[in-house]
Structures are given as structure tokens and as C-alpha cells.
Amino acid sequence: MDFFDELLKTEKEPSKAPGLVSGIVLENYDEKYPGMVKVEYSAGETGKNKSGWIPVASFYAGKEHGAYFLPEIGSEVLVAFILGNWDKPVVIGSLWNKQSPIPKGIPEKKNFNKTVKTKGGSQVLFSDEEKKQSIEITTPAGLKIGIYDEKSKVVIQDKDNKNSITLDAKNGCISLDASKKIELKINGSTLVTLDSNKETVNVGSVDIKAKQSFKVNGQSVSIKGTTAEVNASGSLKINASGITEVKGSMVKIN
């Protein structure tokens, strides 16, 4: 191969990229280029080193499935070039910097904390401390779902913990705590309503059974119905410390 052949070969081959390049995301959506971003490279003169649409690598991707985390506009990214070809850039990751620091409270000495936090403030936090592992999902408004191995509990609560659901696996208990009322529904219909003053049950029929004793206590007790029956297979007693009244259009005893 002579000098001219070498020269022609060099002209045909694309220029080689020296390594990785960082840059700032300028755009992150185009209908024709989904999952791609435009970047201004940090190398070179400002405003004159902008890329076309670049694919973003994912740790899990396939046909109609995968992990989708597209870099935000203004964030710093790291760009690699396939086989060193400037014409084949790929965003391989994002970088924290002074302008875009790591989320507060995450870095710690023993590196127990792992997290995914969105720009809007939604967060999934993993704590990997031995025998104290936990997972917390939190919204910007402070709504939280927590799973705690040490306490063997799953907790759903609001920001101020005024309303919560707690599953206590260790003690076999599920607790519902509401600041106003609790409703149980089936197919959109409210069957049971509980508040601080009253319990309401609204169903077709109610069947209450007790293996031993069944007691109803209250300042006043009222039982109403089109018909009402009180049956006892053994003895039946009706006692009153005051006056006992039995009324009806007709009263039969025995």
C-alpha cells in the first residue's frame, strides 16, 4: 500500500474520539427520537459544540419493556463514543456537580443508603443496615409507605401521621387510624362507617354470633324492625330496676 492509498484510507475513516466527554443536556424530547437527548459538550467553544439526538443507555432495556430514566434538561451527562467514532455517541450516565448536588441526607459513612429521587421530589429510599433493612416510598406532599424489617411492620401514613394503616406482622395486628372517620366499601357502596361518635352498618342483613356470651350496653338501647323476635332455647329473663312496660295492639303471654 503506497502513500496515496494511506491518504485515501485516512480521509475515508471517521475521526477518532479520544475518550469520554461530559456535556449538558439541552433537550430531552422529540417525537421522532424517543429516549434520546441533545447535549452541548463541555469541550470546545461554548455554544458551538452541540450534538444531534443521542441515545441514552439503560441498565435494562428491551422490546416494550425496560427502565426509563431520561436525564433532565440542564443536567450533566457522560458521553462515550462507540469504537471511538465521533458519529456514534451514547449517553452512558449522569453526573452530580456543584450546581446539581447529591440529594441531602443520602451519603453516609457506611453507605447503607440507596435511593431513586425524581426532580419533582418523589423518592424511593432503601436502607441496607443489617437487621434494620427498610424501604420507604415518599411523595413531595409527605405521603409515605414504609416497610421495616426490624419492627416487622408495613406502614402507610400521611405527612403528619394523623391517618395511617399499620400491618404489624410480629403481633398479628392490622391497625387503621383516622383523624375523622373510617369507611368500608364493596363495589363502591359504603357498608360500614366509623367515626368518633357513631358506628353505622348499612347492609342487607347482619348475622352476629357468639360462642359464649353476647352483651350490648349503652345509656339507651333501641331495637326496631317491621317484626322483632327474641328467642331463647333455655330461659329468658327481662329485668328492669324501674318500670317495665309491654305495649301492643294485642298482648299475649303464654
Image: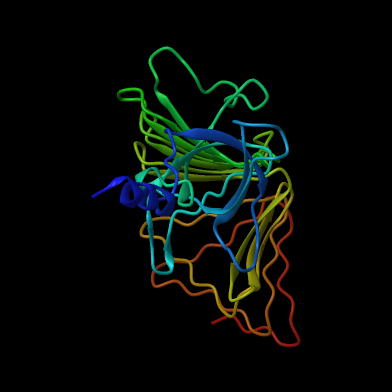
Choose top left, top right, bottom left or bottom right for residue 63: bottom left
Looking at the picture, does residue 135 appear above or below residue 232? above
Question: In the image, residue 87 lies at what x, y percent?
Answer: 48, 51
Q: Is residue 80 left or right of residue 254?
A: left
Q: How many discs appear? A: 0
Looking at the picture, does residue 93 appear above or below residue 132? below
Looking at the picture, does residue 213 appear above or below residue 245? above
Looking at the picture, does residue 43 appear above or below residue 219? above
Residue at 37% from the left image edge and 30% from the top image edge: 133
Residue at 23% from the left image edge and 50% from the top image edge: 1
Question: In the image, residue 125 lies at what x, y percent?
Answer: 49, 34
Quadrant for the C terminus in the image: bottom right
Task: Tell which of 25 and 10 is nearer to you.
Answer: 10
Choose top left, top right, bottom left or bottom right for residue 173: top left
Q: Is residue 34 left or right of residue 90?
A: right
Task: Tell which of 217 and 168 is nearer to you.
Answer: 168
Extreme residue toward the bottom, this view? 250
Question: In the image, residue 84 lies at what x, y percent?
Answer: 39, 42
Task: Tell which of 72 and 241 is nearer to you.
Answer: 72
Extreme residue toward the top, this view? 109
